[in-house]
Amino acid sequence: MARARRRPFGLPEVLLAEREGISKSVATAATLVETVIVTGSAGGVALLGLSQVPNWPDGVGMLLLAGGILTPVVLAIMAASPMSARFWDWLMKLARRPPLASRLKWQDALVSLAAAYGNWLLYGMIAVFALAGISPNASTYLTQAPAIIGCFTASVLGAAVVLFVPQGIVVREGVFVFLLSTLLSVPVPEAVAAAALTRLLATLADGLWAGAALRF
């Protein structure tokens, strides 16, 4: 998840890959595809979750649900189809870079998408349990878990747009509080406390993921 909170094209990842003997072209291709899958899957989870917000005007919930269902299909095509490979090569040519050295196979793209969706669901559940844990309305919020996950992932995407704010700090929390209070009628003090606790728990989870990756 930390990936989506940084700028969308990761020079540090490319440099680290080069230190491990991976060519710059392959590392660039991997970083580009990773960005598409991680950011796009966040959008898909946000659409699916927000479609479950009660009391949408007629048709809005269904429109969000349809977008959420179509998102992984579009992402798989963007990551693995021959047509998308030609598009990325054209894009790299415009940027005066060499064509991408490789692309994902369909099976690898599907596995990557499943992992990315699972990642966002995991972090979204952190937000759900954080809100339920500090509120006397815990049972209500647990039944609204899909909508809360949607609010959380939408807030991460909203914060990612503000590139000059490290990790989207404060911006993400502000968007999350706004969505919770506006769409789910969560009292603002509870929303603020849940946003702060979610940030703390998510940061700890990021640290655990990083530690496990370095160890293994």
Image: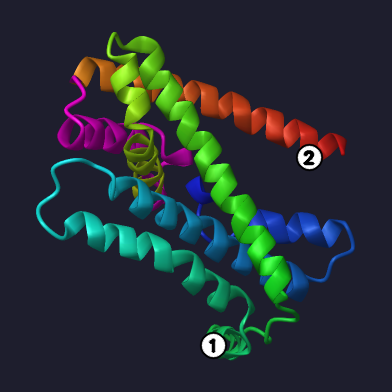
Say which residue appears at 72% left-offset and 36% top-offset: 210
Tell me if I can see residue 31 in this picture.
no
Quarter in which the C terminus is drawn: top right
Left or right of residue 184: residue 110: right
Crowd class of label 2 (few under 14; some 14 to 19; many from 20; radius 10 Å)? few
**Residue 131 as seen in the image, left or right of residue 9:** left
12 relative to 51 in the view: left or right: right
The three-letter amino acid code for the residue at tag 2 is Ala
Q: Does the stretch in magenta take in 124?
A: no
Query: Where does the magenta region start and end?
Result: 159-187
Q: Badge 2 is on which residue?
A: 213
Crowding at mark 1 (Cα within 10 Å: few <14, some 14-19, many 20+): few
**Residue holding disc 1:** 87
Farthest residue to the left: give it. Answer: 57
- Residue 52 lies, with reference to residue 177, above or below; the image says below
Q: Quadrant of residue 43?
A: bottom left
